[in-house]
């Protein structure tokens, strides 16, 4: 057995094991999650939210400063004093990471309740497992992470190529090209 059939069998086995101890997760998996485990930001039994927030903010700021230095070195001071950027990095990133934890806990609670209350017949439970198998397979695929990274880089490329009147001071000043 190879290819998609073997993968589906592995995913199905994971779901069966998870059902036994109510440990199904749509968050814990995928390449980014495994990378965080590899650098010990996440442990199997702990989210280490504080470390992850600090790491995400540090990496985010480093990349913003690096991109600004590469494309518009004179605008670094503007980047550091731009309040919307500070809000996105210092509020938005932690909120997204906390949201991931909340989503994980709520999903596990719902799944555990459905399982413990025996709300589903065996055939209904199998029908519930079919989309879960697809979601776990998608979670463990590299495709969503590649799409997200590509969208992020596309947005950065767009920002560095175009600016709107009244835009951020750290964005490249290309208004001469935009005005006829």
Image (cartoon, rainbow, N blue to C red):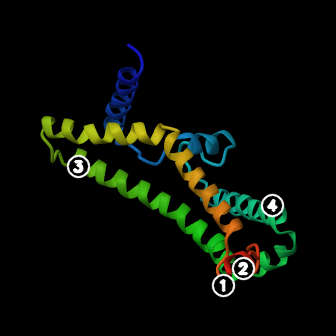
In front: mark 1 or mark 4? 1
On screen, residue 2 versus residue 76, left or right, reads left
Q: Is residue 151 left or right of residue 66?
A: left
Name the N-terminal-most of marks 4 and 2. 4
Q: Nearer the viewer, mark 4 or mark 2?
A: 2
**Does 63 appear above or below 90?**
above
Question: Residue 100 at what x, y percent from top left?
Answer: 49, 58
Closer to the camera, 143 or 70? 70
Could you say whether the residue bearing mark 3 is in a helix, strand or loop?
helix
* Residue that numbered label 4 is attached to: 66
Of the residues under marks 3 and 4, which one precedes in the sequence? 4
Q: According to the image, label 3 marks what residue? A: 114
Q: Residues within 10 Å of mark 3 (few under 14, many from 20)?
A: some
- Left or right: 131 in relation to 48: left
User: Which marked residue is nearer to the observer: mark 3 or mark 1?
Assistant: 1
User: Does residue 29 appear in the picture of this structure?
Assistant: no
N-term mark: 1 or 4: 4
Quarter of the image holding residue 39?
Answer: top right
Q: Is residue 140 visible?
A: yes
Callout 3 touching callout 4 (CB < 8 Å):
no
In contact (CB < 8 Å): disc 2 and disc 1? yes
Residue 122 lies, in percent from the top left, at: 15, 35
Cα–Cα gap, marks 2 and 1: 7 Å
Residue 175 badge = 2
């Amino acid at each position: 057995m190879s290819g998609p059939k073997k993968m589906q069998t592995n995913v199905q086995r994971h779901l069966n094991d998870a059902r036994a101890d109510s440990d199904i997760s749509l968050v814990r998996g995928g390449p980014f999650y495994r990378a965080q485990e590899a650098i010990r930001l996440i442990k199997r039994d702990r989210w280490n939210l504080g470390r992850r927030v600090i790491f995400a903010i540090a990496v985010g700021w480093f990349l913003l400063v690096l991109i600004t230095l590469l494309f518009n070195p004179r605008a670094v001071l503007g980047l550091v004093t731009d309040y919307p950027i500070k809000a996105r990095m210092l509020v938005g990133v932690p909120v997204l990471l906390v949201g991931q934890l909340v989503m994980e806990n709520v999903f596990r609670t719902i799944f555990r309740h459905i399982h413990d209350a025996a709300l589903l017949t065996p055939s209904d439970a199998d029908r519930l497992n079919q989309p879960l198998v697809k979601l776990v397979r998608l979670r463990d695929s590299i495709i969503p992470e590649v799409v997200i990274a590509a969208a992020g880089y596309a947005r950065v490329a767009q920002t560095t190529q175009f600016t709107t009147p009244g835009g951020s001071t750290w964005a490249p000043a290309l208004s001469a090209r935009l005005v006829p």
